[in-house]
Every structure is written in structure tokens, then in C-alpha cells.
Image (tube, helix red, strand yellow):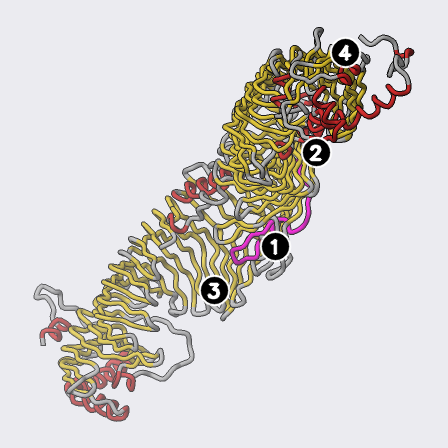
Amino acid sequence: MAEGADQSGETPSARRPRIPRFGWPARIVLAIALVLLLALLGLWVARKPIAGRVIDAELGKRGVVARYGISDLGFGRQRLTDVVIGDPAAPDLVADWLETQTQVGFDGPTLTGVRAGNVRLRGRLVDGALSLGELDKLMPPPSGKPFALPALRVDVADARVRLETPSGVLGLKIAGKGRLDDGFAGTVALAANRVASAGCAATQVRAALRVTIADAAPRLAGPVRVAQAACGGATLARGTADLDVRLAPALDGWRGSLRVATGAVRGAGAQVAGLRGTVAFDGSRAATGGAIDLTAARARTPAGEAATLAVQGRYRIGAEQRFAGTVRATDAGVAPAASLDLRGTAQGTPVAPLLAAASGAVRKAAQRFDGSADLDVRRSGDTGQLRVTRATLTAVSGARARLAGGGGLAFGWPDARLRIDGAVAMTGGGLPDARVTLAQARAGAPVRGRAIVAPYAAGGARLALAPVVFTATPGGATRIATRAELSGPLGDGRVDGLAVPLDLRWNGKGTLVANPACVPVAMRRLAVAGLTLDPLRTTLCPLPETGGGAMVTLADGRMTGGVRLPATRLAGRLGQTPLTLAASGAQLRLGARGFVLDGVAARLGGAERVTRIDLAQLTGRIDGGVVAGTFTGGNGQIANVPLLLREAAGDWSLRGATLALAATMTVGDAAPDPRFRTLAARDVALRLADGRIDARGTLYEPTRTVKVADVRIVHALGPGRGTADIAVPGIAFTERFQPDLLTRLTYGVVADVRGSVSGEGHIAWTADGVTSTGTFATRDTALAAAFGPVAGITTTIRFTDLLALESAPAQVASIKTVNPGIAVSDGTITYRLLPDNRVQVDGGLWPFAGGRMTLLPTTLDFSEERARRLTFRLDGVAADQFLQQFDFKNLDATGTFDGELPMVFDIDGGRIENGRLAVRQGGGAIAYVGDLTQKDLGIWGNIAFQALKSLRYRNLTIAMNGPLAGEMVTDVRFAGVTQGQGAKSNFIVRRLQRLPFVFNIRIRAPFRGLLDSAQSFYDPRRLIQRHLPALLERQKQGAGVPIQPPASGTVP
């Protein structure tokens, strides 16, 4: 063999040594050696058959099926070829050649090396133990000694192993050479199409490792790659891990690192673009620990994303698993859908800008930030704890937050208990600076804390909080106590310095309530819709029926709740007008942004020109820039306007600085002694803007629903100046509708009015006083007055003081007819209305019976129950026309009369006092033109009638005294009686004419029956029957005796 030749050959030029000479002892030894050499030469010749029998015997003894060939067998080297161990159909080992190197010593031969060509090995991993099939039978039994790599030189050209494991089939390719305990260098290649275990799987697993051994400690270094991996719903693409591990000589320890680089990782709705970093490890079978530094790029979840997520720290895996390190996120952002958006919450309230600003600041900070947290994680069996000892957050917006101090934040499982002990500081980024200290005695115990929050201002609103004390239970229920001072917009106005204690309670399930009990409250200023209120202190109580019995309840993005105020008095301004507002009680409902005020008493303007508004109840609702509602039980008076507004009810609104009312009410006279009765006002529209009141409405008489007037009122609150315009289109007086329904002033003065009144009035007022004017007219009006019926009254009255019912002088009324007992027609009266319900009569004139009747000047006072006097003067009254006017058909008279009829009207009615009529000088005549027979008068009466059928008289006076509606006493006296034209004369008559007749007649009868009395007087039948017999009797007694005693004097 070439190999043997290599071992025995010499070079030709080598010098042959000389055999030394030995002594006999040496020769004996040499002889023995020669004998042994000869024996060994014999064995060497027969070595292969012997070795084959020995190997076969040993394989048979162990029950190993094998096939091989021995190509070389020497003292230092042994080579087997075509080695097949195991079932030939599926051998466990196949090698084209195997070679061992041995060394013979005093202890026998020692294996010093192994060489192999192409080797194919099949193995299985069962219950964690490696099985090589038939080769297991050749393994020595366990010695109990620690594992150690042998001092053996190994040279493997190409060894490939098929390893079947529960996770899959692995293919290994091993090549290398060197001493196994020191100096070996080689490669190990691993390949697996799929590896799966415990729900996790990897495909196309590849590894190319460099293997070196130094000082009996192996080292493996090289990449491990997978095409794809999946585990628990998570997937990984293109993973690479550069492994560098040093094993302990006994293979019971390891130290090294793993540099990881992956493609995309996805799972549970999250994904990262790739994972990079290193994992250092150092351990043994008992435990392994090390450092970890991993970074995930472009991490995304439904809640947000981060450019990088990094984990740095140390870990230990053993009976207890532990990690202590830092988790960092850079360029992180929270998804908009996951951000809390309170921008639309509590619109129209002072907290809305703060909530919007805080929400916007949080959203902006959440858009891009860096964060880190120091973690300490421990797990033992099924229990564990996660503790955050420090955490920081820095946003691009400038917001910064930091958790530090104390025990930090601890979360334990499986009971899911949380413990908080530390301090949180927050600043910048449009959020209020705050420091919050948290303490919890133990996990599961309530969390107690204290927060110091700097004042927060945004959008014209400001919130200042006293130190906040709070507690929170593990279930999330939280209670917060502080005192807040709030300023901010309210509707279209704002509130300033609203100070109120806060008792906030969060139920942990999405509901926040505030102040379930009464609290004192103060306010520096309130301005809304043009209304400005001065500082206020009062007590607020929750409404039991709203917001779960709390003042404020915030749930599902909706604010509900309400507050109740006791009797409260407010002061301020409406526009530039001073205002006081008092209420016996008030309620505010936040959910509907509505309120109710009871017993409202509002005063507008200065003390000298105050506008008064009293309401039984006022309701309203704040909607954006509008406050609107209803009111009932209203009473009031506008500044100096002498009108009382009562029983007002309707709708109101406050938009900007404009107050608008739409209502019904009643209007009465503000005078202590009302001049007109209360009227109903309908369709009242009032507008208050820029310190100006503009009101319109229509007045009706309430019992008959008769329209009286249209009214417009304009009032400037600042200067206290205004006007009222009253338009009366036409009031028709009928049997059903009389003036006393409008004013008591006509009661007892006029009645049974038929006609209409129209006109307009104007009232103006300033701080100096009130003026009023007006023009009113009536046409063809009829009425019944105390002095008799009046018809056809037509007049226009121009008032210089409408409220005082004072007119300009010389007002003229034309009267068709008036009958104060004597009917007159077509007259005029000149008059003037005076204050205090008085009428100045300048005079009246009527044509009467060929003459005239004049009403003398007088003043009638209707302000109180007193006598009112009218004096009528008669001038040039013709007797014949007078008789015709009274329809005396059987009388004919001549003569002209003058006189006066003084009349007095008082509580007892009308009467004539000392009325007197007298015929003018020259007298007159009376003639009876009717028929008379003897049957009528008898013989004496007929004689007398024929003689006195026509009489002349020189003097005639009529005196009247008595009530118009009662018994009037009328004294008629006439003298100088002679026969008139057409009378018959005889002896008796001529004798009678010589007598000086003086007639004195007293008539007692109702004045309006006086006409009948006058007719009887002028009727000769009655005259003769009553007076002639007496005259004749007295003539018999003695001629020349006057009828009238001398003491009476001469009668003219």
C-alpha cells in the first residue's frame, strides 16, 4: 500500500547507521526483542482477518446491523470503507469511508483522531433525547461524569444529518477539522422546510454557522434565516438572526448574542415594518439572562402608530422570568378616531372653550410625540407583575408629561390589580401646567392624590383650581374635590369670576357628575345678550329631578343636570340702563340649557324714571346666542308712562342686546284716581335694544271685546325720554257698549250714548316730566244728560294735556237738540276741558221761539260729588212760537219773554233754583181759539168765556223752583188784564173790567208735566172754573175792595 510505503521508505542518500556493540545483557534484551518483533510481524500479516472477527463479534454482541469493509488497519490508523449501519433499506448511517487514528501506550491503544469522507446520518429527537437508531447501541453507558469534549482530532469532509423532530425534519450539513477540545474549526448548515411547535411555525428555515472550539468551549456563529413565521395570529416575513454563542466545555452553559433583522411583523391588528436589534444572553440550564436591544420600525395599531418602538434592558429566564429596562417610542401618534374629542361638548357654556382647547391640545400632542417608560416585569408561574417606575412623554406640540417617584405604576396578574404610587408632572403644549401626586397603600386599595393645576385660559375662558384632592377605587370610581373659579363666554356674552366648590364623581363607566349637594357660589360679573350683572354671592343646590340629583352630569358626550337658587337679588345693567333683578327662586337645567325664575321683580332705569317689571314666572332657554322663553303673571310700568301693565303673559327672547316680547296684558291708569278703566292689550310686541324700548299693541275693552285703540310706545332708557302714540280708529257706542265701560267719569253725567269717537293722542315724557296732546272727534252723537236728552252732538276736541283731560280754550260743540225741560235745537257750546276732571263752559247759544237761549259761562267739576250749576238765559222768546213749540193747539198768544233758568245738578239729581221768566214791556195777549158750549161751562161760565175769550195783559212773570225729575213749584203771576180782540161784552163783563185783576197761580207738578199745567192755565175753561166764582162772590161783599192786600204794594 502506498500508505505502508510512506511509513517504511527511506531516501537513497540516507546514511546507514552502524550497529553498536552491546554487552551480554544487552544482547539478551535484543534477542527477546527480535523474538517479539517476529511475533508482531506474524500478527501484522494476519491483522485484517483478526480485526474483522473482533469487530463482527462486538457488533453481534450489541445487536448492531452493519456492513463495512476494512481498507487499512495499522497501529496508528484504521480505515473502514462502504460503511452502512442499520437497515440497509433505510440505514441510520452511511459513509464512504471512516478512519480512526490511534496511539498505543502503556495503557493500551488510545483513539486520537477520526476522519470521515461523505457521511449520511439519520436521527430522531424523541422526548427531548437524540436517537441515532442502530448507533445508539454502540454508545457507551452514561458514566455520570460531566460532559467534556474528547481530546480527539476530527476531520469531517461532508457529514449530513437528517433529524426528525416533533417540530419538523431538519437537515444538517457538517464539515470541519481540528481537535475537538481545542482548535476545531468547521461549519454547520441547517435547513428545514417547515418547523412548527406550540401553535407557531416557520418555513424555509436556513442556518449557516461557523463552529470553532477553543479550550474545550465550542463557539457557533452565523446567520439563521426564515422565509416566514407565524405564531398566535402574528406573522413574520424574512427573518434573519446572526447568532454568536459560546458554549461551556460541559455544554451546560452558554454566552453570546443574537442580532435580529426581520421583515414585516403583523398580528392582532398591529404591524411593524421590521424588527432590528440584538439579544445578548448568558446562562445555563437553570437560567439564562442578558441584555436586549430591539427596535421595531413603523409600528402601527388601530389606536396609533410610531416611527420606532424600542426595547432596551436586561432580562432573565428561569424559574422566574424578569425584564428590567426601557421601552421607547419615537415619532408616535394616536389615531384621530382613538382621541377623545370634546370640542363639541357644552356649547354655549364657559367650559366649552376650555374643553375644546384642552381636547385640541391633547389631539395635537397625540399626533406626534416621543415617549419612554422604565419597566420592571416579573413572572413566576401564572403570576406576575408589571411595574412602571418612570415614564416620560414629549410631544412636538411642546406638551411634556413625566411619571416619577415612589413605587411607580404596578399591575399584577392574574387578579389584574393596579397600584399607583408616584408623581405626574405635565407642562406645555397648550395644556395647563400640573403636578399630581398619587399614593396607594397596596394594590386594590383606593388611590389617593393631590393635584396642583395652574390656571388654564383659552378662547376667552379661564379656569383656576384650588389644590385638587381626589380618590379613585380599583373599579374606576373617582371622586375629585376642589374649588374652581371660572370665566368665559356664555351664549353671546360671558361670565367672569364664577367661583364654586366642585365635588366631581366619576363612576368608572363613562359618567361624570358634579356637586350632588348645595354649595356657596360667587360671581364677579355676568354679561349675556346685553344683560350685565354685578358681583353676586348666593347658594346653589342641585335639582333632584335632573342629572341624577347632581348639578352637572356628563355622559355619552351630553351634559345634563341643573341647579336651584334661593331668593336672590341681582344688580347690573341692560345695555347702558341700570337694572335690578330679584327672584324668589330660580332653576337652571343644563341639559336643555333652560331656566325658570319665580317671583321676578325687575327694575330698569334710574330711581327717578324706573321701569318696573314684575313676573310670577319667567322661563327661558339658552341656545347659541339667543335666550328665549315664556313669562306669566306680569305687571309693570314703563318709566314715567302713566300706564299700568298687568296680567302680562307671552313669549320673550334675548338676542344680542335685543330683548323682544310678544304678549297679551291689561293696561290701566296709573293715576291714584283712575281716569279710565282697565283695557285688554293684545298682539303686544315689545323690543328693547340699544337702550330703547319700542312697544306696539291693540287695546280692547275686555268685557265686550271692542277695539279701543292702537298704541305704540317708544322709550329711551338712558335719558328716560319717550313717546306713546294712541290711535282710536272709531269707538262706536251702542246699547251694549257705553262710555262707562271705558271710564267712570261719565257715570252720572251722560247715559244712553249713541255715536262714535275717533282720534289720536300723543304722550311724551322726559326726565323733567310728561306732556300729552291729542285730537278726538265725534259726530251726530246722542246721549242722555242730567239736564235732559241731547242729540246731534258734533265736536272736535284738541287736548293740550291728554292725560289730565285738559283741552285748548274755545272748543266748540254743535248740538242738534237739547231738552233740559225746554226743548231747543241747533245750538252750539263753547267749552274747555280743565284738569282734575272739570269742564269750563264759556257759553252756549240756541235759537229759541223767535229769540235765543244762552248757556251762561260756568265751570262743571266732575272730580267729586258736588253741585254743578248751569244757567240758561232766554232772550226775546215769542209767546206764540213758544206755544207752538209746546203744541198748544187751542191757544194763541202774543208777547216777548226774557228770563233765566239757573239749574243745579248734584247727587240728588237736577233742579231749577229761582228760575224766572218775564214778559217784556207792552205785555201781550192770550186768545182761546177752540170751541166751547154751555154744556161745558154752564150759563155763567159761558157768559164769562165769551167775555174773556181774548185777554190782554201788561205784566206776566213765571218763577220756577224744584227738581227736574220731581215736583216743580211754578209761580205764575200776571196783571193788567183786559178784553182782547174778538171777546163779547155785556153789562156784567164791562163791570168786571173795572176790577184791577192780579193773578197769582202756583203750580206743583213734575217739571216735565209743566207743559200740561201751562196749557191748562191758558185754557179759559179751566181758568174760569177755578177763579171766576170766587171773584164774583167777593165783588158782592163790597165794591172797591182790592183783591190783593195793600201791604203787597202796587203791582206794576
Separation (CA) of disc 2 from disc 1: 105 Å
Marks 4 and 3 close (CB-CB < 8 Å): no
Separation (CA) of disc 1 from disc 4: 104 Å
Separation (CA) of disc 2 from disc 3: 160 Å
Q: Closer to the N terminus: mark 2 or mark 3? A: 3
Q: Amino acid at mark 3?
A: Gln
The residue drawn where x is 31% and y is 83% is 139
Numbered tag placed on residue 321 in the rendering: 3
Q: Closer to the N terminus: mark 4 or mark 3? A: 3
Q: Amino acid at mark 2?
A: Lys
The residue drawn where x is 53% and y is 60% is 411
Residue 963 placement: quadrant: top right
Q: Amino acid at mark 1?
A: Glu
Q: Which residue is mark 4?
A: 976
Q: Is residue 857 magenta?
A: no
Position of residue 550 measured from the top left corner of the image (x, y, whole percent) = 61, 51
Q: Which residue is mark 2?
A: 935
Position of residue 518 measured from the top left corner of the image (x, y, whole percent) = 68, 47
Q: Which residues are magenta?
A: 504-524
Q: Which residue is mark 1?
A: 545
Quadrant showing the N terminus: bottom left
Residue 874 placement: quadrant: top right
Quadrant showing the C terminus: top right
